[in-house]
Image (cartoon, rainbow, N blue to C red):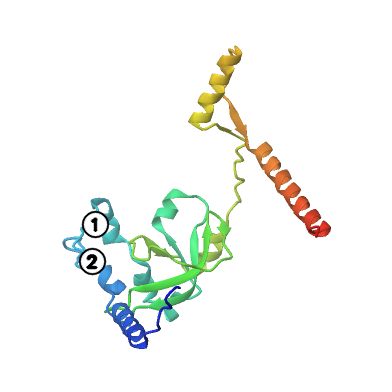
Amino acid sequence: MVRQKLYRPIAAMAKKIREYRALKNRPRDSQRFALDYETMTRPFTGKRLPALAWEDVKNENRLFTLLCRLHRFGIGRMVTRKSWLWAYEEPCYWVITKVKVDYTAENMDHGQAWGYQTFRGRTSDELKEIPKVMYHDWRMVPKHEEENFKKCTPVEEERVQYVPYPPLLRALIFAQRQKEGNVDTEEPMIDLEWSAALQKRRSALQEEHSSQKQIEGTPV
């Protein structure tokens, strides 16, 4: 006989209190990401930023350093990153729709932001939290340049039809050829379109089989 676990209300309440205190005493973003600009170290962790980031720290801004200067913390505005501008020709940006500010920060320049992302000209319909808001490479898109910034010519994706076999399967294929006396040295490749069609056909057959089984029923 299994002994039933007793509900202990005092212990449950004590657990909730401990969880609440841990949540209340957790370090805020303004503490975690505070930076000493003279030594380029974060006081909270004592870690020093990599030397490659020093120039951006001096010349660029964090996201909330830009948003705290705007009306309603920039809701509805477009922001982009310097790394995106350098890496891609297509427009990459966020449209900010929601902001949660850390009011304990001295200049209210820390917090969380959400929005819709457009990456390389393709806009996502899913509302997401904006990552890496503490990085020093955010830039605000001026309002009079937003329409020109959005313009882009869609680039067609390169469709890859053939890919090489994994090393083990490739070795097995060559061993089979050698066993059969085949001296062909052509590299074996996987046809992705054929594999996708085969997978669709297999799933269709499974659905058809399951539907027939439901119609026929189970004999009693």
Q: Is residue 129 at least partly visible in the picture?
A: yes
Res 151 → quadrant: bottom right
Residue drawn at (60%, 11%) of the image: 181
Helix, strand or loop at mark 1: loop
Q: Residue furthest right?
A: 216
Placement of 180 over or under 20, stated as above or below: above
Position of residue 174 measured from the top left corner of the image (x, y, whole percent): 54, 20
Report the residue marked by disc 1. Answer: 49
Placement of 170 over or under 140, stated as above or below: above
Residue drawn at (37%, 66%) of the image: 133
Position of residue 49 measured from the top left corner of the image (x, y, whole percent): 24, 57
Q: Which residue is more in the foreground, 154 or 159?
A: 159
Report whether 107 appears left or right of 143. left
Report the residue marked by disc 2. Answer: 35
Q: Which disc is residue 76 wearing?
A: none
Q: Earlier in the sequence, mark 1 or mark 2?
A: 2
Position of residue 3 measured from the top left corner of the image (x, y, whole percent): 42, 76
Q: Residue furthest left?
A: 39
